[in-house]
Image (tube, rainbow, N blue to C red):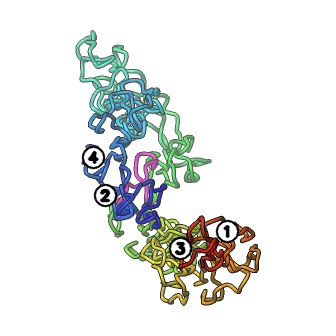
């Protein structure tokens, strides 16, 4: 049988799909690797491949198995025949084909290729040290050191300047020591103080203490803080070195009666506040008072996720993993969520942030509340689900392939085949049996004289020599052939055979056109009979075979 045909006289059309062949006798489909089903219409189930889908896939780590060959397509971060090997350091991506370029000990994420920096490093390739006064993983921690000193970018340990010690450099050197790390020993006379920074014997004017680490007490000034201040105003201080009367921290102006304007602090309001994010500084010390939602020495740190309010003291009242506004605690719902605690989805036909967008989906399609993506129902496709399935497709978003044959029309919703007239079967794979035609082969053919009918229209195909709607009429005299359209070409007014046009010669005539007489010894229609007369004593009549006796002979055959 030719390709895609089978059965008696190869009259049946194979129902097979997806490159399958069929048995020339039974029509059974011989599926190509990767396909199964009566018509080879189904791909291999997940985890199997090959001929008949009998071989089990070996892919690991979520690798995708080719249904024909079983070849594994590995996810990002894995490689190997079965995706069993993790990317080596410096490689990432699908099949570990891409190379990382991280430096300073940064490790490459094997899926995305992003550099995961060690503590103390930042930048796309971990090429930068942490900015000043920050340290740790991602440089997200702030140094907690006094006197404005920097800290180690990895550990956060404070790098104390000479004369200071402690975890935050908050302590002066112990009496008798000075300098970097307080490792130098003072060499001063007994009872004489030693400057904790320089080691100089005797304190400079305005300072006191065993290490000269403290300014003069209020109301005193000069060498050894031995002089008494003479400032009269309540908002006055005297300079610890010279004794000159100056405005106390937080005040300025004539008579030191004016408080520092916003943004300034300190003696005579000479210093600028460093508070950020709306924080207000104390006019006397410059300490920041942060607004709700911020913390840190300079109010530069927003509340961590899940906290809000003054000093970030309150937990967010929102649903799981939903942030809140750091100041008010109002839940910041992600796209697709709504309600006071973001625990409700968007109303019907709404999506996006605060459910503020209107869905554009049509034909009763569902709309994803996060981004408005339309999820088309059965029989529809397109961005807005406003397009019907193209020919050969059906189902949700028209993702399924129709299996109808012989121009059968596939229902875009169910995939059921609507066969054209003259075909039947689940896939329209069969022609109507002999004697039937029409839709679903429900009509009987009325043809006579062995004629067949068109399975679609029911038109009778008359055999040669017959005519009429049902082939019920033979050819008129003198005509023959298909639908009796041809004219007989016979002499002697002889008729012709209605199917072939062969001339039916009368007795005594023969030849293709009955224009020849019988040869000697022959007689009858088409000279088909042999005479029994004596050849020497009689003449045979060519029409009826009667013997005409000669030379005195008698009898039926003239032999007496």
Instruction: Give the residue pinned by disc 3.
Output: 408
Specify whether residue 99 is in view: yes
Q: Measure the C-alpha gap from mark 1 to mark 2.
A: 81 Å
The front one of 353 and 146 is 353
Question: Residue 451 got which mark?
Answer: none
Magenta region, residue range: 292-312
Q: Quadrant of residue 459?
A: bottom right
Which residue has dot 2 on it? 45
Q: Is residue 328 left or right of residue 385?
A: left
3 vs 1, front mark = 1
Q: Which residue is mark 4?
A: 57
Q: What is the CA distance from the residue labelled 2 to the residue labelled 4?
A: 10 Å
Q: Is residue 402 left or right of residue 518?
A: left
Element type where label 3 sits in the image:
loop
Task: In this rendered view, identify the residue nearer to me: 443 or 51.
Answer: 443
Residue to which mark 1 is pinned: 518
Characterize the local packing of mark 2: few (<14), some (14-19) or many (20 or more) Cα atoms within 10 angstroms.
few
Secondary structure of the residue carrying tag 2 is loop
Q: Is residue 335 visible?
A: no
Q: Earlier in the sequence, mark 4 or mark 3?
A: 4
């Amino acid at each position: 049988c030719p390709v895609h045909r089978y059965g008696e006289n190869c009259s049946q059309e194979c129902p097979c799909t997806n490159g399958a062949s069929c048995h020339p006798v039974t029509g059974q489909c011989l599926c190509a690797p990767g396909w199964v089903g009566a018509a080879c219409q189904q791909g291999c189930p997940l985890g199997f491949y090959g001929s008949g889908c009998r071989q089990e896939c070996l892919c690991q780590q979520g690798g995708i198995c080719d249904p024909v060959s079983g070849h594994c397509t590995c996810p990002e971060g894995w490689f190997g025949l079965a995706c069993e090997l993790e990317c080596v350091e410096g490689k990432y991506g699908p099949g570990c084909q891409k190379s990382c370029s991280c430096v300073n000990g940064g490790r490459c994420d094997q899926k995305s290729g992003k550099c995961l920096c060690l503590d103390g490093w930042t930048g796309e390739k971990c090429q930068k040290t942490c900015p000043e006064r920050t340290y740790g993983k991602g440089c997200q921690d702030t140094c907690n050191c006094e006197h404005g000193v920097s800290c180690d970018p990895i550990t956060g340990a404070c790098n104390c300047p000479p004369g200071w010690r402690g975890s935050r450099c908050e302590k002066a050197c112990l009496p008798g020591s000075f300098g970097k790390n307080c490792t130098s020993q003072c060499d001063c006379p007994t009872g004489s103080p030693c400057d904790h920074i320089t080691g100089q014997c005797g304190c400079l004017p305005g300072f006191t203490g065993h290490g000269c680490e403290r300014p003069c007490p209020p109301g005193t000034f000069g060498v050894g803080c031995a002089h008494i201040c003479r400032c009269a105003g309540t908002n006055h201080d005297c300079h610890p070195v010279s004794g000159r009367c100056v405005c106390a921290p937080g005040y300025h102006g004539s008579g030191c009666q004016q408080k520092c304007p916003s943004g300034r602090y300190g003696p005579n309001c000479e210093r600028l506040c460093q508070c950020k994010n709306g924080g207000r500084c104390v006019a006397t010390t410059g300490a920041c008072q942060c607004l709700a939602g911020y913390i840190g020495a300079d109010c530069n740190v927003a509340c961590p996720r899940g906290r809000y309010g003054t000093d970030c003291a309150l937990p967010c009242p929102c649903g799981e993993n939903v942030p809140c506004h750091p100041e008010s605690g109002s839940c910041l719902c992600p796209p697709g969520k709504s309600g006071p605690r973001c625990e409700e989805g968007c109303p019907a036909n709404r999506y996006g942030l605060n459910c503020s967008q209107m869905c554009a989906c049509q034909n009763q399609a569902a709309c994803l509340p996060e981004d408005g993506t339309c999820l088309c129902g059965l029989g529809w496709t397109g961005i807005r689900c406003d397009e019907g399935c193209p020919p050969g497709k059906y189902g949700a978003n028209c993702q399924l392939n129709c299996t109808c044959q012989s121009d059968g029309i596939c229902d875009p919703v169910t995939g059921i085949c609507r066969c054209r007239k003259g075909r039947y079967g689940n896939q329209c794979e069969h022609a109507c049996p002999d004697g039937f035609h029409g839709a679903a082969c429900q009509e009987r053919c009325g043809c006579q004289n062995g004629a067949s009918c068109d399975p679609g229209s029911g038109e009778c195909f008359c055999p040669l020599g017959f005519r009429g709607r049902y082939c019920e009429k033979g050819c008129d005299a003198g005509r023959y052939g298909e639908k009796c359209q041809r004219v007989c070409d016979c002499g002697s007014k002889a008729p012709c055979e209605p199917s072939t046009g062969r001339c039916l010669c009368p007795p005594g005539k023969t030849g293709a056109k009955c224009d020849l007489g019988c040869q000697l010894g022959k007689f009858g229609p088409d000279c088909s009979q042999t005479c029994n007369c004596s050849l020497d004593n009689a003449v045979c009549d060519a029409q009826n075979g009667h013997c005409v006796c000669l030379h005195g002979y008698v009898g039926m055959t003239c032999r007496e």
